[in-house]
Amino acid sequence: MDMMKEPEAGWAIEGRDPRIAVIGAGMSGICAVIKLRKAGYRDITVYEKADKVGGTWRENTYPGLSCDVPSHWYSFSFEPNPNWSHRFSYGAEIQAYMEHVAEKYDVNRIVQFNNPVEELTYEGPHWRLKPKQGDEEIYDIVIAATGILHHPSIPDIPGLDCFEGNRFHSAQWDHSVDLTGKRVGIIGTGSTASQIIGAIAEKVGHLSVFQRTPQWMTPLAQKEYSKPFQALMRVFPFISRALYYYYYKTMERTFCEATVGNKKMQEAVSEACQKNLDENVPDPELRKKLTPDYQAACKRLILCSDFYPAMCRDNVDLVTEKIERIEPTGVQDKEGTLHELDILVLATGFKVGDFILPTKVFGENKVELKDFWDDAPRAHRAMSVPGFPNFWMLEGPTGPVGNLSLILITETQMDYLVQCLDEMKHQKLVAMAPKKEAYEGYNDAMSRAIGNTVWVTGGCDSWYIDKTGTPNLYPWAPRQFRQEMKRPDFSEYRLIKDIPQQARAEAAE
Ligand code: N01
């Protein structure tokens, strides 16, 4: 009897649920599971490298960690939280919220914790997934929910490894080290460093802040919510919803507009930053050192009220001389001064170009995603890549939309993705992937538009800028993003109705 093996036809043709792998159980992985289930897709497995959910909010635990997006907006639209304690939440409270959502929506049950994905190979129309632990598995759809700010960037400074005190990156905070009365150094003055500096300046003996480039910042209008207000929110949930839209619209009309070419808004943001600096740093010499030479919001705008007062303290020094090398006892600057330290904190940001990498991802014809991207990751509508069918990313390349809440962006992307799955089911497709010309057209239009944004015109360098010298961000206003993502234009995609001949031949062997 002929033992020829028939290849599977694909989930939509077989009339079964697609087997879906979600990689990462952070905010976007949790969101993916909830939205997929709501749409009726229930055969889902989540792979998580760590031992609990939460992603960035699990990893980052540094002192002063908070979110600069208002709490009632930095929430899932389907899970408002009347109990937020502050207008801008602190890290631990956001982590608790993520854990609560994962628990409430029964996400944990389908998560394989401590199991990072090592390799993904497309074997049309399936993906073979190789996890660190356990057997390889076959999936119909893969969703990479691996985040952006995820791989700590350790600076290449000579002598770093010979430092004899405690040294750690901000995203790997060592809580066993007591800062009280110690000589602490911190490299970097980004969003992370400014929060840390504000939180620890009073506690440490001496703080040396190593600044390579000054940053613009506006005050953070922090506010504690009273118990009666929280009780009111519990009784009248529409208040949370109203706040969600209030903050959404306010941010959209101000910061977001300022980034994508609205000159009036840009001026307003610049004035607010200058005023903040003038009012909070009375010493003209220090003020000069803290004054950037580029436009506000070119680097990601910092919202922080504690940084300037901390920098004005007697036990805090701003070091603007370049770092020459790290010595066993401290940091030596280019002028030859050794800044002696007990503890060195690297608030030096993240390797942002990796996305799902270092997981090896092989698409059609065994093309590796790493080679396809060649250090300049791009995607079609930030979500998919030609030659990698049924592979989707959340918060992928060019994903951030001018200071919008990342939760809102992820929800929008998931709503889009669900429509694509529905279309696959409806048309009985085995796979879909963006057409090369659609992907190139989209990214060319982005490259042209990005020239009008403050990330380019502002005259700065930032983590937004990739190897091609282009900011890896969405260059248009949020309303355009909403419009474009409302409904997929399926003419942009290869809608694959049959598995490739090669796969048939291989299956028949
Ligand atoms: O990282 P960064 P981050 N020698 O890359 C300096 C989000 N976030 O962790 O500007 C000396 O912004 C570097 O100097 P320069 C938010 O999206 C959000 O602070 O490159 N210095 C810079 O000062 C944010 O944008 C919240 O010249 C070196 C700093 O290190 C993103 O995370 C809170 C150096 C890195 O700044 C990243 O912020 C915190 C070197 N070799 C973070 N290498 C919220 O509130 C780097 N630097 C939501």
Image (cartoon, rainbow, N blue to C red):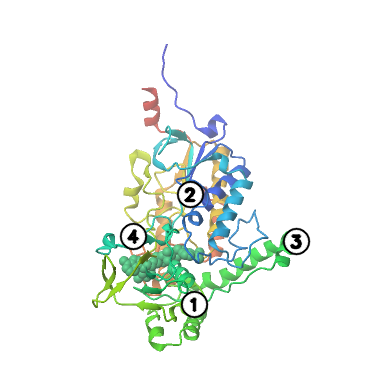
Residue at image location 59% in from the left, 48% down from the top: 102
- Give the alpha-carbon distance from disc 4 to disc 2, as whole Å: 23 Å
Mark 4 or mark 1, which is nearer the start of the sequence? 4
Report if the CB atoms under discs 3 and 1 are less than 8 Å apart: no
Tag nearer the camera, 3 or 4: 4
Residue 116 horizontal side relative to residue 29, left or right: left
Q: Which residue is mark 1?
A: 266
Q: Name the foreground residue: 58 vs 422.
A: 58
Task: Tell me which amino acid carries mark 2.
Answer: Ala
* Residue 42 in sight in this render: yes
Q: Residue furthest top?
A: 1
Relative height, residue 209 to residue 30 (above, below) = below
- Give the alpha-carbon distance from disc 3 to disc 4, as whole Å: 47 Å
Task: Tell me which amino acid carries mark 1.
Answer: Gln
Tag nearer the camera, 2 or 1: 2
Query: SS at mark 2?
Result: loop
Q: Of the numbered discs in the image, which one, if any, rests on residue 145? A: 2
Query: SS at mark 1?
Result: helix
How packed mark 2 is, by other alpha carbons closer than 10 Å (few <14, some 14-19, many 20 or more), is many
* Residue 495 in sight in this render: no
Residue 59 horizontal side relative to residue 95, left or right: left
Which percent across, then down, holds residue 8? 47, 28
- Give the alpha-carbon distance from disc 3 to disc 1, as whole Å: 37 Å
Q: Residue furthest right?
A: 235
Q: Which residue is mark 4?
A: 154
Q: Name the foreground residue: 38 vs 206.
A: 206
Q: Which residue is mark 3?
A: 236
